[in-house]
Amino acid sequence: MNELLDIHPEVAAALAAGRPVVALESTIISHGMPWPQNVETALRVEAAVREHGAVPATVAVMGGRLQAGLTPEAIERLGRQGLAVPKASRRDLPFLLAEGVGPAMGATTVAATMIVAALAGIRVFATGGIGGVHRGAEASFDISADLQELARTSVAVVCAGAKAILDLPLTLQYLETHGVPVIGFGTDALPAFYSRSSGLKVDRRLDTPEAVARVLHAKWRAGLQGGVVVAQPIAAEHALPPERMDACIQQALQEAQQQGVAGAATTPFLLARVSELTGGDSLAANIELVLANARLAARVAAALCTLSALPR
Ligand code: PSU
Ligand code: MN
């Protein structure tokens, strides 16, 4: 067990017994949604994981230590403090951990959540959208650390694809170059978060949690380290029209450029502006897709536990 990692007792018990566990990120709580919907959603997501037979492990940095599994009080603090909680991706973790016991909190991104999940022995993680290659990356070099983490860390990320604030063709190309399988759950097309399709093809369509679990099991049994993207489209009744989203995204990108927003601030800026420009609609859609991903992740985690328990 890692000396810098605290595993919630319920999570530790499930892992020791070979029962399914689903990791959840906390940047979505502190930076991705406004209070109080962020806390309400995080608790509903945990409940959805439980309803589908797995134990939730929301990941964050608390008291200068990595946490796999949070109390409802800790989730409340992450949500109430919002943007005051530093965003923690791979490069930020050493600074937060070096502060040691104390107030040091961090809201873990997809990359940092994967790192903590892998340390804890959790193989399946649910979120909304992954980071990716930003538009204009050929000049800015802005490529989310999430993609490099997917290349190296063996955790499956169940998501609704990535937002069209990113360059989605380049994001898929980067994943291909780094050998990260991209599965479409019930779809041949990469979902674009609020919209069901980006028009780009995934590597393989799979239609059941068992089929997804078989691919994960085969990959890791073969010693092929690294993550897998499991992309599930938002339900049709919650999807937003791509033309409407494109207009908001264009405006947000333009404002980011005018205001000189760069680096780690880029994603939170674009997410916040797009959600302001769409009014409450994008928040409602976001909540629904995260809940759906939590349900699917729990079923994939359960199927993976069944396979892992079979004799070799
Ligand atoms: N995309 C979303 N919602 C989010 C994020 C991305 O639709 O909340 C967050 C995730 O935590 C993701 C992070 O890991 O933003 C990526 O940030 P960056 O591009 O700075 O790596
Ligand atoms: Mn970035």
Image: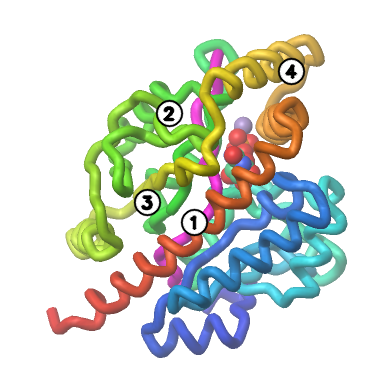
Against 306, is 259 above or below?
above
Residue found at x 14% / y 83%: 311
Report, in whole angstroms, how far the alpha carbon at label 2 lies from the one at label 1: 23 Å
Residue found at x 41% / y 27%: 198
Q: Secondary structure at mark 4?
A: helix
Against 68, is 237 above or below?
above
Q: Quick one: label 2, few (<14), some, or many (20+) residues within 10 Å?
A: many
Q: Amino acid at mark 3?
A: Gly
Query: How far from the left and from the top, in percent, is residue 77?
Result: 83, 64
According to the picture, the residue beneath numbered tag 2 turns out to be 171
Q: Amino acid at mark 2?
A: Thr
Position of residue 132 in the picture relative to residue 231 (left or right): right
Foreground residue, 201 or 260? 201
Report, in whole angstroms, how far the alpha carbon at label 4 lies from the one at label 1: 31 Å
Q: Secondary structure at mark 3?
A: loop
Residue found at x 60% / y 70%: 46
According to the picture, the residue beneath numbered tag 1 turns out to be 292
Report, in whole angstroms, how far the alpha carbon at label 2 lies from the one at label 4: 20 Å
Query: How far from the left and from the top, in percent, is residue 114?
Result: 50, 56
User: How many labels sit on residues?
Assistant: 4
Position of residue 35 in the picture relative to residue 40 (left or right): right
Which of marks 4 and 2 precedes in the sequence? 2
Q: In the rendered structure, which segment of residues is drawn in magenta?
A: 121-136
Q: Amino acid at mark 4?
A: Ala
